[in-house]
Image: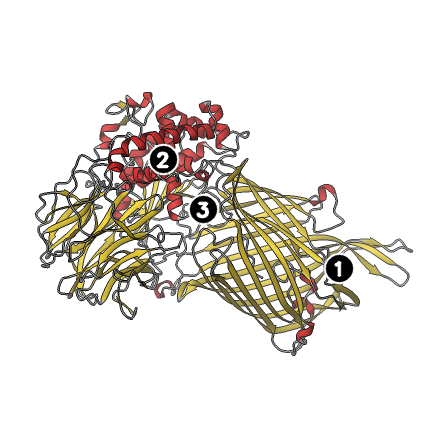
Amino acid sequence: MECAFAPLLKSQEPEFHHPEAEWYTIETAHFLIHYHAGEERSAQLAAKIAEDVYLPVTELYHHEPDQKVSIVIRDFDDYSNGGAYFYDNKIEIFAPALDYDLRGTHDWLRNVISHEFTHIVQIQCSMKFGRRVPGIYLQWLGYESERRTDVLYGYPNILVSYPVSGFVVPAWFAEGTAQYNRPELGYENWDSHRDMILRMEVLEHRLLTWDEMGVFGKTSLGNEEVYNAGYALSSYIAWRFGEEKLRELSRHLASIGTWTIDEAMKDVLGISGRDLYREWKAYLDSTYARRTAPVRAHLVDGEKIAGDGFANLHPAFSPDGSKLAYLSNKRADYFGLTAVYVLDLSTSKEKRLAPGARKSFSWSPDGKKIYFARVSRDNRYWSNVFDLYVVDVASGKEKRLTYGLRAFSPSVSPDGTALLFVTGKDGTLNIARCDSSGRNVTMLTNFANGEQVYSPHWSPDGKRIVFAYSNRVDRHVALLNADGSGFRLLPLNGDARDPIFSPDGKWIYFAWDTTGIFNVYRMSAEGENIEQLTNVLGSAFMPTVSSSGALAYSSYGADGFSIHRIAQPHSIQSRFHYVNEPLYPGRQLASNSSQSMVGDNHNGIDWIKLQRYDDRIVPSLPSYRYRNVFSSLTLVPFIRVDNYNPRNKGIDVIKPGAYFFSNDALGNVGIFGGVAVNRKLERDLFLIFSYGDRLPGLWKLGVAPTLSFEVYNITRAATGFIGLETSTIPVDVTYNLLEFDVAAQQPIFSEKNILSLRYSHSRYSADIGTFILPISRIPVPGTRDQYFIGNSVKISLAHTDILPSRDEEINPIGRKFTVRYTYEFSKLSSGEYEASSAGLVPKYDLYRFHRAEMLWNEYLPLPISHHVLTVGLRAGTIFGPPVRDFFDFYAGGMIGMRGYPFYGLSGNRIGVVSVSYRFPLFRHIDRQIGFVYVDKLYGSVFSDFGNAWTGVLSPPLAEWKRDAGAELRLETYSFYSYPTRIFVSAAYGFDRYTRAINGGNFTYGREWRFYVGVLFGFEFEP
């Protein structure tokens, strides 16, 4: 679960709009529940739950949102998460319940709604400028010193856009308070998974540092550790100081004078953040050393046989026991980047199969195939859903079995003719059956009240099915007959999960947290004679048993999950157990004032009723068709230093302004605009209206482009000169650029490919001010010279395939490819005029031509870890006879060959080859300096070889230009949540050359050029 930390000044639209959906709204006293057809149960329960948690959360923080909060429920994808858009008073919820290997099992809707609503309330308490002003931007635009007299000012070489955030809440505190919410509710608790993660960090001396806890931007495991440590530390504060201190800390963070959590803690708690962290850490060291002493004295954790990466999951012995297959992310940074690996147990050699496979999988009875599930958007409406596949172990050849079935966790029947799998809808999971080719689907269970089922497995005789089941919190071992009858739960208290039958059918193996630590147990197939088989410090999950009786499982340690094996497991005596007690014993995780509320009706809160809810009872609240509900207009002021005009001095270079935006709750319709004006009334204006809802005649075909209607207006003041017979007269000239765009974009073939179509109409004019003739002193009135009327149609295809990683911004790996085609039909002033009744009218030259351009970047990993070689290619041409340099490509500057100025390399054709080598200098700096967290520093060296020219033939290669340079990239976070990426680069152009342009000669090359950026990203594209 996440909160929408940094508003990056763009429409909050979903990646895919799903115009096929019919949307409805349920309105309650404090909420608007927006849902699409098919999610009625989830929506009705969300309305009930939201009102249940409203008073407990607002009562703790003494704050109520200033309008009804929208809750949007989506069920298009096999994905589970929640997000709080606290500036918009909006919560997004994905209906499928969370099934994450680092989290315990809770009632999903009650857990996520209480969590996200706490984000809304707690962070709004912490806002410095109010809900409608998320921050202020400080901007600086510097420009190259331009030599060409026909160019008004140079291209930018300094780009700074730095946010001063309106909320300063570290990640651990935001997520910690959201998980703490109100412990009396019981919708989140310190379960065995939470304890597992913190326990192993402490025991293996891997606890996040105080500075690390403040930000995300880590691996899946690292980000979860932020959540986990935040929950533990927020609970510690409530336990030691009283939970009212969570409110006081939040409100203190709203002070204009407070810019770090350390300052707030010193004022509110009387202890600095670092000192409190050291105190907390010492407490954890002591309590976990004491509580794990019996386990450490009698460890039974087997032999590690696979541990590369932190997500080594779902081990499964082959039928003959000679191989072990498992899921692993290996060196990837995120849990979702797993594949199936097959380990030959006799040779220890591994084979990679089925990239993208997730959740449990199954061997075929003959051991030649593996059935697995993978998510993809290869369906009509681009939903990201699971389907079933089969892969040949020997050849690696795959076959897809289902399309859009939302099916996962397949299990092959003992005779190989049928598959079990899990499928879900409206927040409920069920078990279904199909034949081994994916056809003839039959439902075996028909749960309809939010029940969850996990990883079903056949008994060896094919008569029974064992699986994990949950109806509220925790999981339980369940049995079912093969025809779907005879559902029953085995009597195991606590969380029991991952059950499988032994190959002989006599035992059921499972993971159980009865001692507070998950270990592997087994019991007879009838649910009797329970035996413990492991005794680990972390946890043991997902057991598998070979035909010879060997046991393998996924074992958790501070560095994640690894695969362990015990050749001959034996029953363990029960007295060597973890001391299972509350993390902070002797006092509830609530202040004295709220302890009395448990069981009482205090301030209108009936805690007993809220704890003993029955969500099998679904309300029948009235609904109506969704009508656009827009967020309040958000305003983001900025102060910009914009010194494009070297004649501007002092206050003239200051250009204040503001961005503004608003979006409807579904993200289908939005506006985004900006205005900036300086003292000389030079202005920068833009307005963008976006639309992503259904288009008649297209949406039924699965075509759902995002449309945008855009207008831009820029004015610049300058001094021009009019030459008369005897003198040259200076005149004021205001250049006015006006452009209207209509654009559409749509993914094509894959979500990695975006097809865009854009029509642009532009009008450029020069307004010449009034001047006086020097001899006659006769005033000459001002005139407008419209020198360009442009029209163009552009089609572009952009392919982006960058490996998701924590370094993907600073050091990407993968590929980016863009190809563009443009047809221009424009009029450009010839410089001549003709007389008319309206005065002098400019004559225009008509230009009709075709333009094409290609940009290709390959980011290639090198054998040395985190070292990357980038090879780039840019090629472009204007077809047909030469056109005026007004339409040229430009090859230099910050977005091109940095050894030469932007306007110093131009022509109707362009070709550039670039090479860069990037490497880490410090991958983990981990230093908080004021409100800035410094994360990592990379360096690079680069070189370019290219040219731009006009004419059919390219100049000889000896005349092509060369440059080389170096760059530093520093990745930081400001105010805990805003990514701040800083780069400094220097480049030297090796070739000196002179260009004749409009009667003047201009020399370039053999000079150093420098560039600086402070932005949200590092990469630019021409």
Q: Nearer the viewer, residue 943 or 702?
A: 943
Q: Which residue is mark 1?
A: 147
User: x%, y% of residue 88?
Assistant: 44, 42
Amino acid type, label 1: Arg
Q: Residues within 10 Å of mark 1 (few under 14, many from 20)?
A: some
For the point 48% across and 42% down, which residue is it? 977
The disc at residue 231 is 2
- Element under label 3? loop
User: x%, y% of residue 870?
Assistant: 53, 62
Amino acid type, label 3: Gly
Closer to us: mark 3 or mark 1? 3
How far apart marks 3 and 2 lie (CA) works out to 18 Å
User: x%, y% of residue 316?
Assistant: 23, 57
Q: Are marks 3 and 2 in contact (CB under 8 Å)?
A: no
For the point 69% across and 47% down, which residue is it? 681
Closer to us: mark 1 or mark 2? 2
Q: Nearer the viewer, residue 410 or 844?
A: 410
